[in-house]
């Protein structure tokens, strides 16, 4: 049976990791002769210790984003044994450090300054997960560009972003830093972010980007940060690697290792990842850096017996630069002398780092990025703040809006504003706030006030705290609710309940917040639930009782204004979820593109893949989000057959049948009906975000490339098989129309 099927199918085997877009894999760096000569001359003057110094990165004391590590001292700076420093920002401080290095060190090699600029430097934009819900690649690129301009104005050369880890488990705290659970969308967003950060690469108003964390960090067991990852090679190639490949194709200059082990080998010790895939297959021309202390942690992983062997293993695996633990500086010289490390490899790694410094113009002018005037002018510019508001409002997902409660009329007279996040500023910055400041944040209270001025009374009560079980504030909140025309209740997580090392076992609203919401609903007043959180939550009871739910994540400094824009109808929400919301933690992992089963799930039938106590379907599926208007889809038009060398043209017309202008994100999914390996029930393969004025129709066309319909086998070959495919188009991953077509 299998053999005869194989006879019918034509199998295309693409060389592993050649881009399916047909781009070639030439090294993305053309070395010019002047540069080559300069670097060779410099290398010839460097002692082995100085070379290894270039491979060592230390952290400034003021911002520790990890556990205790090697101390950065003036004598270290002056010794010329530092290649890079992280987590210090500001032209004044950085100039001073660079000055010490240049004046005192023997060869005056400039230091490279890195910083975690994840969603803005000072102008903090929505957390990356929120921003991904806009599905707006141009805007996402613009947001990264803005961060790049601000960070570089503060003297920073290098941002440790984007994080491109696909994340299918909402318990994992770092889902907040990525683009959600889908590989296709994640790859597009990865590309946009790299382009944004490196918008003017090598110029002093742009930073280097860093693709992190290589690889599969987003798949830790039980969603616990740093836990091992065990996945098939096909899943690695198909789900977790493509966003990294998209970064290489977008010319990203650096890569960071992941903390986890992958199929038994810590990523930081994986020559398979760093030498075979990244260097040999993908021809990545930039340099790699370990994550914080990740080299030393090879001992805790149990693959290195001591600090010295940890350093040797990581370096030999292809980790050029060592972040924070100082082990390269301590042990690599000795290891070279003992021939445990090849000097040529040291030279190669050093060259990669020197090339980047050269291209940044730092040898010509080590102070090139330190322009105090620019720093004053470029940071928090009014147009940046406007853009932050635009991105924020486009990141808000409307989950429920019964009885068209939203938008609220601006003629409303009395609003009860309740909840621990209703008048809060600091939490709204989210995880990784760089130099973002609480005082720059517009709270929800202020946002509503800005919108309505004195025309409405806004009556605030906190109701309860985030975590505490104290209900003393309930009575006042309930009284307020019953005395006002409408209730807006802002509940959710604290900013630091998501992010690094912030995994949660429970995804419910913390403390007594859910109870508060239920009691407010019981007053019979219209209640708008505004959620603020860094991951999908499990809120089935709120969904059951509340008629309006708005997911606003953590939207950064313009939070309040952006939420008010949506609440009062100045912006019609358009965002759609990039991570599914489960009904309960028991459904996790709950991503939409799971693989088929021999006993497909059927809630009515036993002996099918299901839980006996919970529907299989998510509460809110991937791609889901409502608008104030309605969109009607025509039947899709597409041929019954298409050619293996061609593209399938799929057309659908979308009409705005409601009473507001609005944007719709039209999604195209594909399922391979018969293949030589088990395939997902569906996979996103295209999307278009379109503005459609009320009453109008827009024709949307997708050209599905047959090359995009393949899959990766466990030998990491990319295969496209002919045969039957189901093409689906719709509003979200569940609400689709479909047609079967044949790839000939
Ligand atoms: C550890 C995190 O995993 C990484 O994302 C970050 O860039 C470094 N620390 C530096 O802060």
Image (cartoon, rainbow, N blue to C red):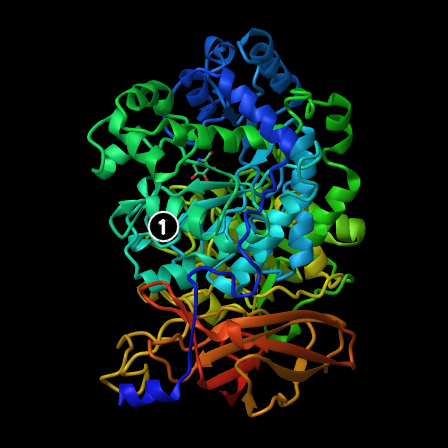
User: In which quadrant will I find the N terminus?
Assistant: bottom left
Vertical order, 3 against 336 (above or below): below
Q: Nearer the viewer, residue 33 or 548?
A: 33
- Name the quadrant containing residue 529: bottom right
Left or right side of 566 for 727: left
Vertical order, 423 against 703 (above or below): above
* Residue occupying the point 54% across, 46% down: 162
Left or right side of 714 for 435: right
Q: Secondary structure at mark 1?
A: loop
Q: Nearer the viewer, residue 585 or 463?
A: 585
User: Ligand 1 lies in which image quarter?
Assistant: top left
- Name the quadrant containing residue 368: top right
> Visible in this render: residue 206?
yes
* Residue occupying the point 67% across, 65% down: 573
Q: x%, y% of residue 702?
A: 64, 77
> Visible in this render: residue 731?
no
* Residue occupying the point 29% across, 77% down: 610
Q: Nearer the viewer, residue 63 or 28?
A: 28
Tell me: is circle 1 under 8 Å from ligand 1: no
Label 1 neighbour load within 10 Å: few <14, some 14-19, many 20+: some
Q: How many marks?
A: 1
The residue indicated by pointer 1 is 504
Left or right side of 368 for 555: left
Q: x%, y% of residue 743?
A: 50, 85
Q: x%, y% of residue 85?
A: 51, 24
Q: x%, y% of residue 62?
A: 50, 21
Vertical order, 470 against 14 (above or below): above
Left or right side of 309 for 526: right
């Amino acid at each position: 049976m299998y053999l005869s099927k194989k006879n019918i199918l034509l199998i295309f085997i693409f060389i592993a990791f050649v881009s399916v877009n047909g781009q070639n894999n030439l090294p993305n760096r053309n070395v010019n002769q002047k540069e080559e000569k300069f670097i060779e001359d410099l290398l010839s003057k460097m002692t082995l210790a100085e070379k290894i110094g270039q491979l060592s990165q230390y952290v400034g004391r003021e911002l520790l984003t990890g556990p205790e590590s090697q101390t950065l001292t003036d004598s270290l700076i002056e010794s010329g044994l530092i290649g890079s420093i992280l987590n210090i920002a500001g032209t004044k401080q950085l100039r001073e450090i660079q000055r010490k290095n240049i004046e005192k060190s023997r060869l005056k090699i400039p230091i490279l300054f890195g910083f975690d600029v994840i969603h803005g430097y000072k102008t903090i934009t929505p957390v990356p997960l929120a921003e991904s819900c806009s599905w707006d690649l141009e805007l996402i690129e613009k947001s990264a560009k803005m961060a790049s301009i601000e960070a570089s104005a503060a003297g920073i050369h290098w941002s440790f972003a984007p994080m491109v880890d696909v994340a299918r488990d909402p318990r994992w705290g770092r889902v907040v830093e990525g683009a959600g659970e889908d590989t296709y969308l994640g790859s597009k967003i990865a590309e946009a972010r790299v382009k944004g950060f490196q918008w003017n690469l090598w110029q002093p108003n742009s930073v280097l980007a860093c693709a992190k964390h290589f690889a599969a960090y987003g798949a830790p067991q039980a969603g616990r940060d740093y836990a091992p990852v065990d996945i098939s090679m096909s899943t690695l190639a198909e789900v977790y690697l493509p966003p990294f490949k998209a970064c290489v194709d977008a010319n990203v200059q650096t890569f960071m290792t992941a903390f986890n082990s992958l199929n038994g080998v810590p990523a930081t010790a994986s020559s398979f990842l760093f030498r075979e895939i990244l260097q040999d297959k993908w021809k990545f021309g930039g340099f790699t850096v370990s994550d914080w202390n990740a080299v030393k942690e090879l001992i805790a992983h149990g693959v290195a017996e001591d600090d010295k062997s940890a350093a040797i293993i990581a370096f030999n695996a292809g980790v050029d630069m060592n972040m924070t633990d100082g082990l390269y500086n301590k042990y690599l010289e000795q290891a070279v002398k003992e021939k445990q490390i090849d000097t040529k490899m040291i030279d190669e790694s050093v060259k990669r780092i020197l090339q980047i410094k050269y291209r940044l113009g730092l040898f010509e002018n080590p102070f090139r990025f330190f322009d105090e005037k620019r720093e004053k002018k470029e940071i928090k510019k009014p147009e940046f703040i406007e853009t932050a508001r635009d991105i924020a409002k486009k990141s808000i997902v409307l989950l429920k809006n019964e009885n068209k409660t939203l938008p609220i009329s601006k003629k409303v007279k009395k609003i009860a504003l309740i909840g621990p996040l209703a008048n809060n500023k600091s939490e709204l910055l989210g995880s990784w706030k760089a130099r973002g400041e609480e005082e720059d944040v517009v709270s929800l209270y202020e946002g509503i006030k800005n919108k309505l001025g004195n025309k409405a009374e806004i009556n605030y009560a906190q109701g309860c705290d985030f975590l505490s079980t104290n209900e003393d504030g309930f009575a006042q909140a309930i009284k307020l609710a019953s005395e006002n025309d409408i209730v807006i209740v802002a509940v959710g997580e604290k900013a630091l309940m998501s992010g690094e090392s912030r995994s949660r076992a429970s995804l419910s609203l913390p403390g007594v917040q859910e109870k508060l919401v239920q009691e407010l609903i019981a007053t019979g007043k219209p209640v708008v639930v505004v959620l603020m959180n860094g991951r999908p939550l499990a809120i089935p009871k709120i969904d059951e009782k509340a008629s309006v739910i708005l997911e606003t994540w953590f939207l950064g400094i313009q939070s309040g204004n952006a939420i008010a824009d949506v609440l009062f109808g100045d912006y019609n929400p358009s965002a759609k979820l990039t991570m599914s919301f489960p009904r309960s933690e028991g459904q996790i992992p709950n991503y939409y593109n799971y693989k088929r089963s021999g006993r497909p799930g059927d809630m009515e039938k036993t002996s099918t893949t299901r839980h006996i106590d919970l529907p299989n379907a998510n509460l809110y599926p991937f791609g889901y989000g409502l608008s104030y208007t309605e969109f009607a889809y025509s039947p899709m038009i597409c041929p019954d057959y298409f050619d293996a060398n061609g593209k399938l043209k799929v057309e659908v017309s979308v009409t705005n049948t409601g009473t507001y202008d609005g944007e719709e994100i039209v999604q195209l999914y594909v399922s391979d009906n018969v293949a030589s390996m088990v395939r997902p029930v569906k996979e996103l393969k295209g999307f278009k975000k379109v503005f459609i004025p009320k009453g109008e129709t827009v024709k949307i066309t997708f050209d599905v490339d047959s090359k995009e319909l393949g899959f990766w086998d466990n030998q990491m070959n990319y295969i496209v098989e002919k045969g039957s495919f189901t093409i689906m188009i719709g509003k979200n991953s569940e609400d689709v129309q479909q047609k079967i077509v044949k790839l000939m």
